[in-house]
Amino acid sequence: MPKINVYLPDDLADAVRDTALPVSAICQRALEQAVRRVTAIRQLTRADLAGDDLAERLPAFTARARSVLATAAGATDPPGVDTARLLAALLDDGQNLALHVLRAIEVDPARLRRDLAAHPHAEPDSDPTGRHVSGPAATALQLTLTEATALGHNYVGCEHLLLGLVTEPDGVAGQVLRAAGAEPRLTRRAVSAALAGYVHLRAQTPAPADPAPALTAALDRHLRP
């Protein structure tokens, strides 16, 4: 059986030894789940993203994240799914956590919309028939899963999709986001802060009428020096 080395920080390695965790079994299980998720992404077509069974195809994605994907797949002028369509759908949703993150790092969603409109949509490895997602879009979706896994999350939300788009190097969305100031490390830090603030907010006020002001304040506390 092939062997794959896994390198751990010293403190984590010590904790693993102290607890006598079955490292091989845990790693194998985690890798199996990651492979299944990435394989599902790589096999997606535009019709899959727009289909009624998207929840079955991408069960780890939140309902809002799936809605964003379906919106991107529904664009028809021209048909196809690229990173620009994914970012536009994320912005058009209007209520997701990714938008709070962008505003917290002083990236204006309205500016992003203007920049997308002014940017040519052609991306490398695009399907001229519009049936398949573009190469950069497929990579961005894979990176979305990677970011969720790296953060230790068992779900994939719009905030992870934002990170996938920011870190993808070749697509229109990443170029537009980075030019506007959404640098990957800063955006990742803001996502972590937003999630921490959201959990705290839910614990303090289970059903706020409008969580945006409190969430923005929590982000400011985490991100501002």
Image: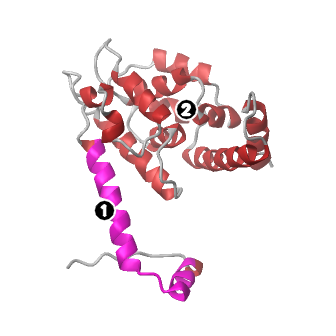
- Rate crowding at label 1 as few (under 14), some (14 to 19) or many (20 or more) other CA atoms within 10 Å: few
Say what amino acid the circle numbered 2 marks.
Ala
Q: Which residues are magenta?
A: 12-41
Q: Position of residue 51 (x, y in %)?
A: 29, 27
Q: Residue furthest top?
A: 77
Q: Earlier in the sequence, mark 2 or mark 1?
A: 1
Q: Residue at x 64, y 30 (%)?
A: 107
Circle 2 residue: 179
Q: Could you classify mark 2 by the number of other residues whose Cα lies within 10 Å: few (under 14), some (14-19), or many (20 or more)?
A: few
Q: Please identify the quadrant where the N terminus is shown.
A: bottom left
Give the residue displayed 68% in from the left and 37% down from the top: 105
* Picture disc at residue 64: none
| Front residue of 68 and 54 | 54
Residue at (28% x, 17% y) in the render: 79
Residue 34 within the magenta-colored segment of the rendering: yes
Q: Amino acid at mark 1?
A: Glu
